[in-house]
Image: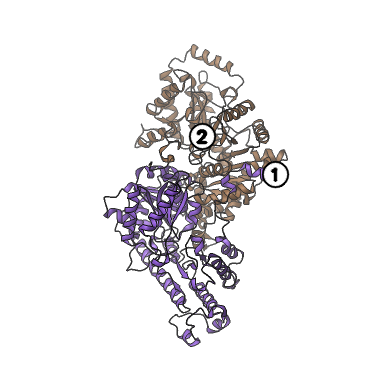
Amino acid sequence: MAANLRNQNQLLSKMAIGDGHGENSSYFDGWKAYDKYPYHPEERPDGVIQMGLAENQLCFDLIQDWLMKNPEASICSPDGVLNFKDTAIFSDYHGLPEFREAIAKFMGKVRGDRVKFDPDRIVMSGGATGAQETIAFCLADPGDAFLVPTPYYPGFDRVLTWRTGVQLVPVFCASSNNFKITKSALEAAYGKAQELNIRVKGLLITNPSNPLGTILDRETLKEIVRFINEKNIHLVCDEIYAATVFTNQHNFVSVSEVIEEDTERNRDLIHIVYSLSKDMGLPGFRVGIVYSYNDAVVNCARKMSSFGLVSSQTQHLIAAMLSDDEFVDRFIAKSKELLDKRRKFFTEGLEQVKIDCLNGNASLFKRMDFRRLLKDQSFEAEMELLRVIINEIKLNVSPSSFFHCSEPGWFRVCIANMDDSTMEVDLLRITYFMLQNRYRNKVVKVPTKKQRQQSSLKRSLSRRKMEDFM
Amino acid sequence: MRLLSRKVMRNTHGQDSSYFLGWEEYEKNRYDHVNNPKGIIQMGLAENQLSFDLLESWLAKNPDAAGFRRNGQFIFRELALFQDYHGLPDFKKALVDFMAEIRGNKVSFDPNRVVLTAGATSANETLMFCLAEAGDAFLLPTPYYPGFDRDLKWRTGVEIVPIQCTSSNGFRITESALEEAYRLAHKRNLRVKGVLVTNPSNPLGTTMSLDELNLLLDFITEKEIHLISDEIYSGTVFSSPGFVSIMEIMKDRKLENSEVFNRVHIVYSLSKDLGLPGFRVGAIYSNDNMVVDAATKMSSFGLVSSQTQYLLSEMLSDKKFTKNYILENHKRLKQRQRMLISGLEKAAVSCLKSNAGLFCWVDMRRLLSSDTFEAEMELWKRIVYEVKLNISPGSSCHCTEPGWFRVCFANMSEDTLKVAMRRLKVFVESISPIRSQSNHQALKNTRRRWSLTNWVFRLSFHDDRELEER
């Protein structure tokens, strides 16, 4: 039987039988716990709450409302069925022109209309996942490398490398300067790759950052553009969280703005990856975009998009929705407002029990600083704490190690993928955890019952329920 | 340093082949019976446009599926968030039931063995990544769909080695052709990982015989390699002999518990049978758990939009609809194929006897100035530029014999088809104007030579009226 299995294994590719998909990593333990016993307010109030999934569920009402008022956007409805045939047979990899125009306009609006995008450079892909892999196929050969600042989205380990044969070289960033990407960190990573005889083809940044939830300031972005021009390597900017920037003082600066200003730089090196999964909360619709300033890359990526085109039914819907300027403006503003409200609610709740978060101003998550709760500053201690969080507090959160962060103790928690009452339960659980004996001496100030009652947080749960948790 | 990957620089995406060049000409000068009656008629596109009214009428009766509703409840949010690469369970169930129905319910499929992909394009590429390493080879019978050169080879690095089939036996696969291809691969130092067949065949429009299917099974058993059966046209078999899937043969031969059972994989799609190429619905079906597992993870790069999965799960779950659709679709395809053959015959052109697909494999060898591929290209260019018909030359399908062309019949109206046939008749008469004894004698000789074949070889010399009545 074992011999048979071994024989079978040789029949398949190394790709199929190896671990390159990354799904055996313990990143997924919390997910497995959640899948086994997910939280439900009535049926499973002690279930695991999913805080590991960066979804945006705050604005569905707006979209649903628009759909009800615009039935012709669905090619299958009586109002839209005239378009059914033409749309259903449309498999041109250029994509529906109105789709590309609507996406280009949306991308511009998300960047405050400070920059215009060319619809002819919009290339479809199977979600951002498909977009990132496509870019890697276009820019690099097997064995080549991309530099990626840490911490980074663990999915890159699979998406960029599994089938492409490309490798990732980390650019180490530290909490001492808020994980800023410095020139010296970039040079160090590049130098390290050279030492190991690895050819670096590009630098991949995620802006706004996952998992940090921060945006790059203009100076850092310009520094990065200078660096890649010097080394003659590509810059791939994953701007998938562009519309989740929620503080007005810190406007999101896209790489597209920087290169508009800095005309000396080589545009052929600049590429953007985008998607509607986070900004609009539509991951199921698989709308990924590759936007490149390099004509050869646009052409090649477009041909490759045959492997992951967006369903024309979905293209039609999105084209109609994003062409509605009034709706788009309202959506972008409302989304920021609700994210801001949610972030404030969460961070103020954490402050009550003296938990800090990294000072971020974008994205669908916060990064909690649990460093002082570790028994020692090691990744083993971090995993121990993670197990406690999953098994005792019943929250699925994502620790530093999964994002290749050099420092243990940071936990990313997603805050936009649940309703208000589930968020309250989250906070209660975290609060209870912090107030438990074993961590009591690590918390500088424990709010008294009176202080909690007087807290500016207007939690709608009864005191009785709070006592239950105590 | 070369800035872009070798994939960008090479042209193994195959898009420079004549198959695509004809399309480009068509795009510049599209036929329209009102606005551009002298334009190019597209006969190179294997689309099924004959049964849209059936789909539209179903949509009219099922407004829920169209409008993100289930039993009147709005399920938009659920769908928008659904990005599980296992796919919507209801959709997979409906899909396998549909696949079984197409096979006369002689076989059944397990929904847990289906992997959804963005079209058959993605399914075929994914299988290559799972079953072969770069530098390995798959054997494919010629002529084959030109897109395989891109889908199977481009990003995977896998090679295709042809199994040469000839008109001497109606392009059937023979044991000697298989062995010869296997030997050729070894001579080129390529490790053969499997055979890929399209059944029904594109471009031949024929279903595989029982002999061929059994031969293939024996061959892959002996060589311990895979068999991929691309059954994308399985729902377009409109006359006898009916469609026999490789699954049925394995069931008849009681091979369910054998090793070979795990090495047979099916590719399917709704692009041809339902005429929905824009919706990008493809599937891999495998009995090998590791293949299902790996392919499922890889499908992240090209998932099917949840909006589309939901619509089609509702549609395909309607058994009354699917039963009627399959029958009516067959009827219409058969009638349209007869119309094409009749038109060809009036132009004194014959084609391979076929019982499936959306095209005919047309024999224009006698119109060549010489028995060479250069002459075929010459003829093809005349047909595109003078006759203004975009048809696909056999060389683009890797046919070993010059003079064969694939002509599609299901992607245009009846009137357009009649126009196309009239143009062809005029052209053929102009280049072989003497419908004389000598011509007739030459054809009689040819008939004797190819007497073992089962071609349709009725010519219009004697009885035009009879043909019109067919």
> Looking at this rendering, what residue extends furthest in the front direction?
A195
Specify the amino acid type for callout 1: Asn
Kindly identify which chain the residue marked by label 2 belongs to: B
Left or right relative to B419: residue A10:
right
Kindly identify which chain the residue marked by label 1 belongs to: A
Q: Residue A330 appears in which quarter of the rendering? A: bottom left
The answer, for residue A90, to whether it is visible in the render is no
Please determine whether, in this image, residue B86 is positioned above or below residue B204: below
The answer, for residue A65, to whether it is visible in the render is yes
Q: Position of residue A428 (x, y in %)?
A: 52, 77
* Mark pair 2, 1: CA separation: 35 Å
Reading the image, the residue beneath label 2 is B145
Q: Which residue is depicted at the point 26% across and 55% down?
A: A261
Specify the amino acid type for callout 2: Tyr
Q: Position of residue A308 (x, y in %)?
A: 47, 47
Query: Residue B83's mark?
Result: none
Q: Colour of chain B?
A: brown
Q: Position of residue A310 (x, y in %)?
A: 45, 50
Q: Colour of chain A?
A: purple
Regarding mark 2 in the picture, which secondary structure is present there?
loop
Left or right relative to A181: residue B237:
right
Query: Residue A4's mark?
Result: 1
- Is residue B346 or residue A366 the one in the foreground? A366
Please determine whether, in this image, residue B385 is positioned above or below residue A248: above
